[in-house]
Image (cartoon, helix red, strand yellow):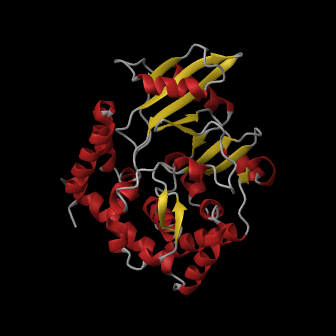
Amino acid sequence: MMTILQSVARYETWLRAQLGPDIVEKDLEGKHKKMRESPFVFLRATYWRWAETILDICKGLENAPEVLAIGDTHLENFGTWRDAEGRLVWGVNDFDDAAAMPYALDLVRLAASALLSRRNGEPSSRDIARWILAGYRKGLEAPSPVVLDRDHEELRNQLVLPDKERNKFWKKYWEMPPAEKLIPPRYIEALRNDLPDRNMPFETKPRTAGTGSLGRPRFVAVAEWRGGPLLREAKALAQSAWLLKHDPGDVTIYVGMVASGRNRSPDPHYNVDDGILVRRLSPNSRKIEVEDEASLLLSGHMLWLMGFEIANCHASDPGRVDAIVKDMDERSGDWLRDAAKVAAAFIAKEQREYAAA
């Protein structure tokens, strides 16, 4: 197995070849700094490394039934949005590395991220695995979008931003500095295609966000429309890092296929346009971060819901559900806990090696 430093260099060489002059070198430098902060941030930043190593360090997962999976699953890959009916929905909000892979990997990665982000050893590894699996089994049995407007009132109240935070949200984008260099026309066109009026004026600004996607160009369209502010974001996509390792000939972008699965109620403004992901940004369309909501994200109820939402994605192919349930029933009672602990320990070791280099 190559070292983590060798892996970083090889992956970023590949990414530069994919993005060409669009790559944002300054953001890659920022990503390297983030990778030294903590094992949890390191996990978020290095999905390609997970794809390279997980089947070697967690033996037996390669035999799990394959599904069209999320891939880069972790505590911060969940958020809220408005669906086509205006309802507030919660669930997975990043599918950049979606691909066909063993179903168990989404669960192990989520559990490992919880282990790496907890404080003082709480909750226990056994509880984390138990809650995730309980939600996942229920989701396979009865998949359903997690619509907050009626059936999850308490969670809705926890996730909706108060007025002060909503004002800060809009102000942040209005005060973002303008682009210092010419923005590639295809990003502007992708943003224009998702606006309510193609002829409306808007300003395009570069944005730095995320962790694993740092280095890929992002731009936001900032506009006023019918009495209020409006935002769209465009982000470059690339081949899933899972496919890069396990099926490099498959360059299909699976983002939209998973996001719009039969058991989800997606944001109608979450679309792929010419290799660019375009989505709506608003105080209702955002991810939930550990820094702000650690106790909520690590609660039993939330981890149960995360398992449930992963099942919503996996059960888009109902023909795979029986095989998944059979596989889980044949595994030891602590299989998820044991795999997550091994994965988390390996990630923490590599993060220390990278931070010390």
Give the image location of residue 356, x and y in percent: 20, 55
**Residue at the image position 48 percent from the left and 20 percent from the top:** 204
Q: Residue furthest right?
A: 150
**Residue at the image position 28 percent from the left and 44 percent from the top:** 32
Figure quadrant of residue 80? top right
Residue 168 visible in image: no
Would residue 224 be found to the left or right of residue 172 on screen?
right
The correct choice, above or below, for 174 with respect to 50 in the image is: above
Residue 108 visible in image: yes
Q: Nearer the viewer, residue 189 or 104?
A: 189
Give the image location of residue 279, x and y in percent: 57, 36
Give the image location of residue 178, x and y in percent: 42, 17
Would residue 45 be found to the left or right of residue 262 on screen?
left
> Quadrant of the image for the N terminus?
bottom left
The correct choice, above or below, for 9 with respect to 132 in the image is: above
Q: How many marks?
A: 0
The correct choice, above or below, for 329 with respect to 3 in the image is: below
Q: Nearer the viewer, residue 99 or 77?
A: 99
Give the image location of residue 225, x and y in percent: 67, 17
**Residue at the image position 77 percent from the left and 50 percent from the top:** 153
